[in-house]
């Protein structure tokens, strides 16, 4: 018998004497919520890829992994849409056996897509951090986190596969010769591996703080960068709420109905994670849009730097950090080392919010500057 029904006390299919007075708008609620989140995630993801491709005409490992996450999330959404179209806000007592089996099978299919989506989002963030900072200790630490996330994901997958024997017992509640874990055991195992999974959400969100405050940028920009990368904390909160609701669903008398809110929070963790992973890469576009309105998200630390980096002297183009080297040399206003020139050719402010490395050019004083 399916874990979802074993010990739940769910009424048998066709028993119309169960509580049917509850509202039956759960299907539209789930579809509307997840569709809105998908649209937002897809918009932010597409803008990220556009910004990266426009700057480099190539993509990095972080872009590829977030693309995998977006593809898996879209596939999971498609299955969820089919599930709640089939469920149509009905209670388990109002469903036929074949409908219950299809719903459980679709739920079983969504699980691996969801798990790997969340994993790919976190791995994408870690690849981005590896591209930003490449000290040996940092590489070992971030690489270890990637391995931990991968192993945790595999552990969750194994848990799903072994909790019922045969596997078809996960979606066929009428099988007799089965060996399934009790709901309590499923709950405890899920608490263990899922708590570790949620913990990595918070680690990925807080990890950039380890070096943001050490970079040579104005406090205002540091705060903006910290807030952008801290958006991942919201995904972690969604994961905590999802874990808290797990016991309710496993012990529910109406599991197909009561799992709706759990589905919303699970997909919120997934889509919010994608948005949080992509938004920091849009800092340059947001800066340009804000500057077009007369403001500036970031400023240089000193008046002299502000003049050079925001275009009030010749040689700097409108704050976009595009150097006119010939003009700079001829006017003798600034000299930039060859090493920094090469570095700037490989990075841009459209890259990630940490393009600070490209603007730390060593400025030598000249008679005009004194």
Image (spheres, rainbow, N blue to C red):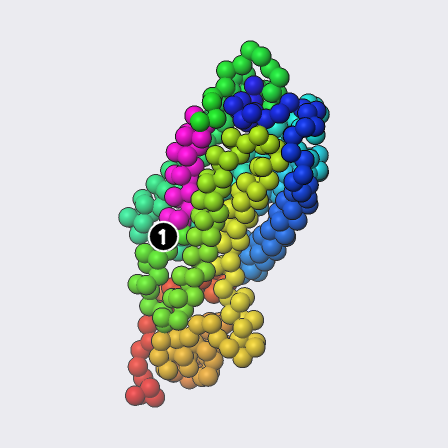
- Magenta: main secondary structure: helix
Residue that extends furthest to the top in the rendered view of this protein: 177
Q: Quadrant of residue 100?
A: top right
Q: What residue is drawn where x is 33% and y is 68%?
A: 216
Q: Quadrant of residue 106?
A: top right
Depicted 334 relative to depicted 184: above or below:
below
Reply yes or no: does residue 321 show up in magenta.
no
Secondary structure at badge 1 equals: loop
> Magenta stretch?
185-204
Determine if residue 310 is in view. Answer: yes
Determine if residue 123 is in view. Answer: no
Reply yes or no: does residue 186 show up in magenta.
yes
82 on left or right of 370: right
Q: Nearer the viewer, residue 11 or 317?
A: 11
Residue that extends furthest to the left in the rendered view of this protein: 137
276 on left or right of 99: left
Q: Give residue 126's position: percent from left, percent from top.
A: 41, 48
């Amino acid at each position: 018998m399916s874990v979802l029904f074993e010990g739940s006390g769910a009424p048998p299919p066709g028993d119309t004497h169960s509580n049917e007075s509850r509202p039956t708008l759960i299907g539209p609620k789930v579809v509307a919520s997840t569709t809105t989140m998908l649209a937002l995630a897809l918009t932010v993801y597409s803008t990220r890829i556009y910004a990266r491709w426009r700057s480099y005409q190539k993509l990095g490992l972080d872009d590829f992994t977030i693309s995998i996450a977006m593809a898996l999330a879209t596939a999971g959404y498609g299955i969820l849409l089919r599930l709640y179209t089939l469920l149509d806000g009905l209670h388990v007592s109002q469903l036929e056996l074949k409908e219950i089996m299809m719903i459980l099978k679709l739920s079983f299919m969504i699980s691996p897509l969801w798990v790997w989506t969340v994993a790919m989002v976190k791995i994408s963030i870690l690849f981005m951090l590896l591209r930003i900072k490449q000290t040996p200790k940092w590489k070992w630490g971030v690489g270890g986190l990637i391995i931990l996330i991968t192993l945790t994901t595999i552990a969750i997958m194994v848990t799903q596969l072994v909790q019922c024997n045969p596997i078809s017992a996960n979606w066929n509640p009428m099988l007799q010769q089965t060996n399934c874990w009790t709901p309590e055991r499923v709950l405890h195992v899920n608490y263990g591996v899922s708590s570790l999974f949620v913990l990595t959400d918070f680690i990925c969100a807080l990890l950039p703080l380890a070096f943001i405050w050490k970079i040579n940028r104005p406090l205002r920009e540091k705060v903006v960068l910290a807030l952008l990368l801290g958006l991942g904390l919201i995904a972690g909160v969604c994961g905590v709420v999802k874990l808290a609701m797990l016991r309710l669903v496993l012990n529910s008398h109406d599991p197909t109905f009561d799992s709706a809110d759990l589905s919303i929070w699970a997909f919120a963790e997934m889509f919010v994670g994608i948005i949080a992973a992509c938004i920091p890469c849009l800092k340059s576009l947001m800066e340009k849009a804000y500057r077009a309105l007369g403001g500036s998200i970031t400023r240089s630390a000193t008046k002299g730097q502000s003049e050079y980096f925001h275009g009030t002297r010749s040689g700097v183009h409108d704050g976009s950090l595009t150097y006119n080297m010939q003009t700079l040399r001829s006017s003798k206003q600034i000299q930039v080392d060859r090493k920094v020139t090469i570095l700037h050719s490989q990075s841009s402010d459209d890259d990630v919010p940490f393009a600070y490395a490209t603007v730390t050019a060593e400025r030598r004083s000249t008679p005009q500057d004194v």
